[in-house]
Image (cartoon, rainbow, N blue to C red):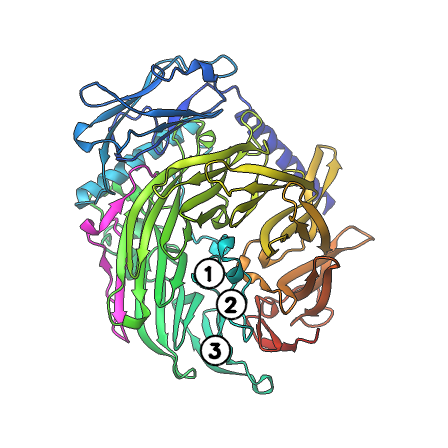
């Protein structure tokens, strides 16, 4: 075994040396515009309120940019267009004129002087130009020819990127099933995120925004427990505890249930589904040349469960594409999917139909898959994502009505939803050889009312988002935290930013360049405050004051070992951090950071200028992990009942040989007191005694409560435990 480790170590070191040579090579000084390469010859289409974000591969000399001569916009007649420049260290924002670009005065041209100079003396060289036309609304795809033209352009850019990067990178990124389990939380809605909104009778899912429900693998109404697991839907009668029994179990063949919504006597079951007919669709001639994934579509089945022992299908919606996320506001359900466009087919089959297909049937009707009509597809002009995003919204009170379907080309895989608005974050990368330095994020805002989802505005920020925790809406403003750059890149170190945008998605203020060389690990917005954790070797917790949207500022900072990748409010003066303890290890190749058990922290933020880590609890050793490290819905928190519970798999270190062995798998239930800290109430396991390895079927996935009992849910069974503290 030691010999294998040594050989593997040499391979790792060799790869590290190769990457170091690639990434530490002296870079040229280059610039890129959001969404598309600066050197593109084709005229781009942008929205009329387009804010150009020009990102540079290096920090530039600000005095080398003349506000009037270095960067400016002209209309079709060559006349200067009024625009405003905002300079940061490595990017420039070019804001549109008041009222936006007039589509009638285009095409426009953005001019970038070659005399702009980096801090190390490099110049851009020749002048760069971006030609663009402006439209007031998201453009609609009118025909197959226009749609395929969009993807042919993407294909060409991908090939350019492959040549420039010499095969090290792919410029096209496929969005897959998102760990939407990383949703963020707006503490304007802190009470709901504590998962105790059911009046004490039973727990609810730990959600992001009060009144906006999130689908999960387990739901309860206080009488029954509903569970999606192992290609099954299980309904368990939970009370009385002595007579707990499974009243219904539906097994599926080609459908794997993933998440659930519960609304009175209706149950929405969302999952993945694959069918050869759906996959080949309109491209049956080329289907044989495709690599077919196991799952390629998302299905939502709505059941009438007035008789829990006999669920009856009311409606089935099938959307070609991977499941991204879903939300429920009162009786309205919103389902979002991403369909990767197989645009590479266009090389050999330019007439291929790339559109996603959908089906909407009532009752037990046979599903009929139909392509989304071309005039029903809009596209985000700036996006480099090669996906179709489909939003299906339905009214559970009008279940016989067809779901409202909207489809967009150029989608992202991060969303945030309030009661009134849906926000989509779309990552953008330039296609030059140094694209990793030039990432930015386009933000699209949609108004939501009933089943209507309509585009409202868009904006842009530098950097990329961690997850939904990075986004928040509060008092008409949209707040977002982002990391720019990569922690491993010593030539252009990473930095972290917080931006505030108005209702029109214009950046009104920011706090930038925090924690150079680190990246964001967690974010929590709490009304007029925000808490951001960054990490590389130690964990800085930053406290932001956002009370004045025009002047956000950092009030305090705390540096401690380890990091929190989930933050949860305890009360207005205390914050719970859940993450990992870390330690530095030295070997013959240097010092590295390793995780050393799961860590829970209670932060005292009563004085925001001096945040304190008041109490800590470290569980297990290396390899210890919990679903809560990446899925906020795994948490059961109720302050009144003094419950902070989560599933966990804990490992202890063997003192003799340094190996790690299973110590515990199951639910840990803590109490939290701001003065006394963490108290272990109980540990609940479904595993057999003295087991060496955890049995998947007996692993606790969720903990919930009904009245005076905790219920631990595994794929195999549900167990009730009396609350005695």
Q: Is residue 541 above or below residue 317?
A: above
Q: Which residue lies furthest to the bottom in this view?
A: 243
Q: Residue furthest right?
A: 656
Q: Distance between the residues labelled 3 and 1?
A: 26 Å
Q: Which of marks 3 and 1 is nearer the N terminus?
A: 1
Q: Where is residue 217 in the image (x, y as percent from the top left)?
A: 49, 66
Instruction: Tell me which segment is drawn in magenta.
Output: 354-383
Q: Where is residue 251 in the image (x, y as percent from the top left)?
A: 43, 75
Q: Which of marks 2 and 3 is nearer the N terminus?
A: 2
The residue lying at 72 percent from left, 65 percent from top is 680
**Viewer-side residue, 193 vs 310:** 193
Q: Is residue 424 above or below residue 98?
A: below
Whether residue 580 can be seen here: yes
Check if mark 1's residue and mark 2's residue have beta carbons within 8 Å.
yes
The residue lying at 51 percent from left, 16 percent from top is 119
Q: Mark 3 points at which residue?
A: 235
Q: Mark 1 points at which residue?
A: 210
**Viewer-side residue, 161 vs 266:** 266
Q: How crowded is mark 2: few (under 14 residues within 10 Å), some or many (20 or more)?
A: some
Q: How many marks on residues?
A: 3
Q: Name the residue under label 2.
A: 197
């Amino acid at each position: 075994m030691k010999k294998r480790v040594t050989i593997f170590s040499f391979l790792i070191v060799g790869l590290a040396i190769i990457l170091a040579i690639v990434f530490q090579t002296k870079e040229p000084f280059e610039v890129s515009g959001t969404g598309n390469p600066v050197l593109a010859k084709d005229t781009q289409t942008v929205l009329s309120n387009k804010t150009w974000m020009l990102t540079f591969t290096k920090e530039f000399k600000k005095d080398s940019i003349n506000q009037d001569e270095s960067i400016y916009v002209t209309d079709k007649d060559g006349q200067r267009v009024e625009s405003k420049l905002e300079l940061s260290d490595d990017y420039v924002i070019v804001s549109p004129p008041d009222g936006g670009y007039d589509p009638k005065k285009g095409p426009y041209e953005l001019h970038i002087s070659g005399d702009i100079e980096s801090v190390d003396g490099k110049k851009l060289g020749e002048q760069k130009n971006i030609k663009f036309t402006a439209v007031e609304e998201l453009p609609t795809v009118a025909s197959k020819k226009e749609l395929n033209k969009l993807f042919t352009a993407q294909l060409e850019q991908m090939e350019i990127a492959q040549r420039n990067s010499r095969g090290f990178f792919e410029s096209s990124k496929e969005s897959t099933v998102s760990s939407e389990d990383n949703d963020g939380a707006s503490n304007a809605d802190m009470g709901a995120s504590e998962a105790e909104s059911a009046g004490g009778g039973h727990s609810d899912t730990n959600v992001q925004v009060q009144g906006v429900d999130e689908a999960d693998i387990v739901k309860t109404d206080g009488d029954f427990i509903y569970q999606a697991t192992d290609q099954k839907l299980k309904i368990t009668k939970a009370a009385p505890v002595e007579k707990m029994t499974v009243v219904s179990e539906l097994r599926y063949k080609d459908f794997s249930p993933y998440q659930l919504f519960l609304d009175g006597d209706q149950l929405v079951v969302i999952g993945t589904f694959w069918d050869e007919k759906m996959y080949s669709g309109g491209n049956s001639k080329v289907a044989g040349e495709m690599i077919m994934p196991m799952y390629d579509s998302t299905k939502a089945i709505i059941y009438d469960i007035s008789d829990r022992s006999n669920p009856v299908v009311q409606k089935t919606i099938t959307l070609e594409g991977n499941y991204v996320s879903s939300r429920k506001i009162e009786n309205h359900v919103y389902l979002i999917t991403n369909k990767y466009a197989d645009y590479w087919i266009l090389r050999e089959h330019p007439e291929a139909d790339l559109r996603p297909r959908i089906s909407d049937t009532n009752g037990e009707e046979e599903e009929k898959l139909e392509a989304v009509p071309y005039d029903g597809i809009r596209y985000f002009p700036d996006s480099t994502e090669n996906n179709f995003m489909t939003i299906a919204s339905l009214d559970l009170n009008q279940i016989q009505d067809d779901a409202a379907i909207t489809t967009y080309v150029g989608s992202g895989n991060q969303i945030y939803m309030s009661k009134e608005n849906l926000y989509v974050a779309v990552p953008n990368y330039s296609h030059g050889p140094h694209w990793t330095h030039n990432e930015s994020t386009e933000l699209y805002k949609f108004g939501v009312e009933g089943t209507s989802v309509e585009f409202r505005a868009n904006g842009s920020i530098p950097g990329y988002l961690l997850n939904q925790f990075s986004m928040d809406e509060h008092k008409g403003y949209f707040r977002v935290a982002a990391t720019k750059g990569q922690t491993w890149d010593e030539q252009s170190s990473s930095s972290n930013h917080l931006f505030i945008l108005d209702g029109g998605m214009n950046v009104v203020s920011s706090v930038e360049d925090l924690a150079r060389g680190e990246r964001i690990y967690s974010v929590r917005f709490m009304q007029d405050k925000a808490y951001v954790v960054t990490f590389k070797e130690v964990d800085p917790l930053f406290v932001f004051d956002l009370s004045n949207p025009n002047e956000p500022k950092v009030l305090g900072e705390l540096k401690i070992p380890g990091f929190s990748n989930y933050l949860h409010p305890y009360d207005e003066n205390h914050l719970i951090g859940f993450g990992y303890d870390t330690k530095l290890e030295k070997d013959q190749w240097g010092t590295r950071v390793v995780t050393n058990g799961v860590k829970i922290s209670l932060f005292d933020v009563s004085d925001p200028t001096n945040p304190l880590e008041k109490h800590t609890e470290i569980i297990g050793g290396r390899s210890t992990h919990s679903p809560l490290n990446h899925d906020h819905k795994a948490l059961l928190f109720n302050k009144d009942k003094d419950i902070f519970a989560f599933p966990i798999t804990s490992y202890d270190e063997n003192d003799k040989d340094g190996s790690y062995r299973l110590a515990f798998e199951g639910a840990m239930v803590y109490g939290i007191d701001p003065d006394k800290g963490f108290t272990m109430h109980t540990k609940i396991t479904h595993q057999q005694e003295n087991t060496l390895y955890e049995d998947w079927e007996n692993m606790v996935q969720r903990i919930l409560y009904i009245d005076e009992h905790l219920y631990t849910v595994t794929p195999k069974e549900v167990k009730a435990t009396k609350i005695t503290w």
